[in-house]
Image (cartoon, rainbow, N blue to C red):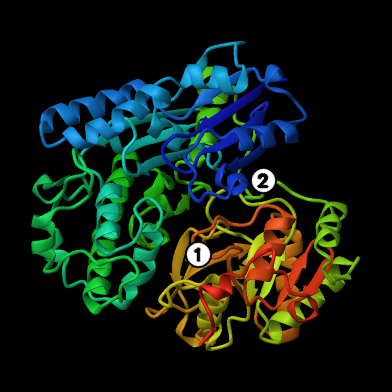
Amino acid sequence: MTWILGISCFYHDSAAALLKDGVLVAAASEERFTRIKHDPGFPRNAIDFVLGVGGITIEEVDHLAFYDKPMLKLERILLSHLQSFPKSKAQFIAAIPLWMKEKISIRRVVGKELNWKRKPVLFAEHHVSHGASSFFSSPFEEAAILTVDGVGEWATATQGVGRGNTIELFGEIRFPHSLGLLYSAVTGYLGFKVNSAEYKVMGLAPYGEPTYVDKLKQVIDIAEDGSFRLNMDYFDFDFGMRMTNEAFFELMGSEPREPEAEVEQHHKDVARSVQEIVNEIMVKQARALQKKTGLKNLCLAGGVALNCVANGHVLRESGFERVFAQPAAGDAGGALGCALWVHCMVLGNDRTWVMDRADWGPGFTDEAIEAVLEHYGATWTRVEDDAELCRVASSEIADEKVVGWFQGRMEYGPRALGNRSILGDPRVLDMRDRINIKIKFREGFRPFAPSVLAEKAGDWFDLRGHDSPFMLLVADVHEAKRTVPAITHVDGSARVQTVTAEATPLYHQLLSEFEAQTGCPMVINTSFNVRGEPIVCTPEDAFQCFIRTHMDTLVIGSYVLRKQDQRDYPEIGDAREAFPLD
């Protein structure tokens, strides 16, 4: 028996993953435990959790892997600063002390935090971890691999092939030329938080027109094979404390939007334009890779692989028949990737596992849930039978209630996929606005995704026969089926999750019951959290979120709670005070 622990940390979305003989046992992001969104810190809580699921101590771990090579990353940072000196002086002074304290001393940090003394820490290159996380967890025996993100050590995008228990990356684009950093730069220009709110740009884009594509092509030169170069005259991220500069502002025709300021048509048009650039580059890179390899399957990874709009274009336009990305495609997935890299490529073992579900985080018994509810003096009804629980929850949704759904083990990755979800009726015209305002306290332009029975998905969405179990594909809603306005975005598309009885049996049962009651085989599914907070992890997180928002009903384990039955909870606080209803 061989235990492998993989960790990622110190940039954003720290995480831990544990393999037993090459099979994933548990994986989770540190943010879910600390409640600090995108927590970059050492994933002590996540490590304790995965070891607990495995029933082992750190002394029983055979191999410990880290998701990138800090010395190579430091080399890139030092050379970039030297090339830009003295303009880089302020960033250098801010960054280097942190590097010397923890980022470069991973062995020392691991030794101190975990008392790890058994064997050396194994370091995988950043994009190797990305590629391994996707291919080695995919159902494919062979596939092309495309990884695209902000930056690893030097690489910002790589191309390669996976066969059996090996991957080979044979092409790369290097820093500072980065599609992920371009998208993040525009995210910051639009007044959203970098490395956190890029998905807002994706959601805003359909409201705009691609009027700035030509101007952006002065910023990025795109070749026919999808390779590209940034014009660094418009950026400061390679040496400065900001992403873009005055030249970029002049090109775009205005200063950056202030956070929380009104979103104007200009901002929508810029968002649409950068999304068009991403779509073009991803399709061209994938198309060139398909022609080079002749393969039918593609594995995507890296933060840009979370851009489900671009993924949809890749599926439809690249020539690949099947496209796969695991649910934690960003840096959190690096913990899984480096562990799989050790199992397959360092130890030479065969692959023995496929990522067909996302629920690898903490789960809680009914007894643990009831203890929390009793602690708060909550009022509930217990429903022992799964069929009755789904009937009650479906009836609440069909009655236009907003329902918190907390079941089983928490998802790995940024998407709620039916275990830590907020649910609503997609047929109700104003349900999207009600959830945005009453529950999520977020921008009204943000779309919601449908969770749909996999066997009915093709009737409603143009998925080309493809599954989308991890909500990583955008597809058009068939025109004849646009009777679900709450999940149909302004451009007629939807970010689809297909649900099977094998992967999430209780959630599938809920959707089946909702279809039986309403004739509609889907519900709105958004993550169980409010703006600025991570997805809920524990029953206490879920109960507090339920109380602090205008959520109508909470279905948590076997328990059903209705807001109207609960007392006031001044000790919990109330997010509604900051975001009152009109």
Find residue 529 and report its image quarter. Answer: bottom right
Give the distance between the C-alpha atoms of the residues marked 2 and 1, in whole angstroms.
21 Å
Q: Mark 2 points at which residue?
A: 361
Assign the N terminus to one quadrant of the image: top right
Q: Where is residue 483 in the image (x, y as percent from the top left)?
A: 54, 87
For residue 274, which numbered disc appears in the image? none
Looking at numbered disc 2 in the image, what kind of residue is underneath it?
Gly
Whether residue 372 is situated above or below residue 476 in the rendered picture: above
Q: Position of residue 14 (x, y in %)?
A: 50, 39
| Left or right of 186 in this view: 14 | right
Q: Nearer the viewer, residue 502 or 291?
A: 502
Label 2's element? loop
Q: Position of residue 297 (x, y in %)?
A: 45, 46
Give me the residue at 73% from left, 70% from top: 554
| Left or right of 494 in this view: 168 | left
Mark closer to the chain start, 2 or 1: 2
Give me the residue at 75% from left, 54% from top: 408
> In the rendered image, is residue 282 in sight?
yes
Q: Position of residue 20 (x, y in %)?
A: 69, 28
Give me the residue at 55% from left, 25% from top: 344
Give me the residue at 8% from left, 56% from top: 247
Q: Residues within 10 Å of mark 1 (few under 14, many from 20)?
A: few
Label 1's element? loop
Q: Which of 24 and 14 is in front in this view?
A: 14
> In the rendered image, is residue 348 in sight?
no
For residue 531, which numbered disc appears in the image? 1
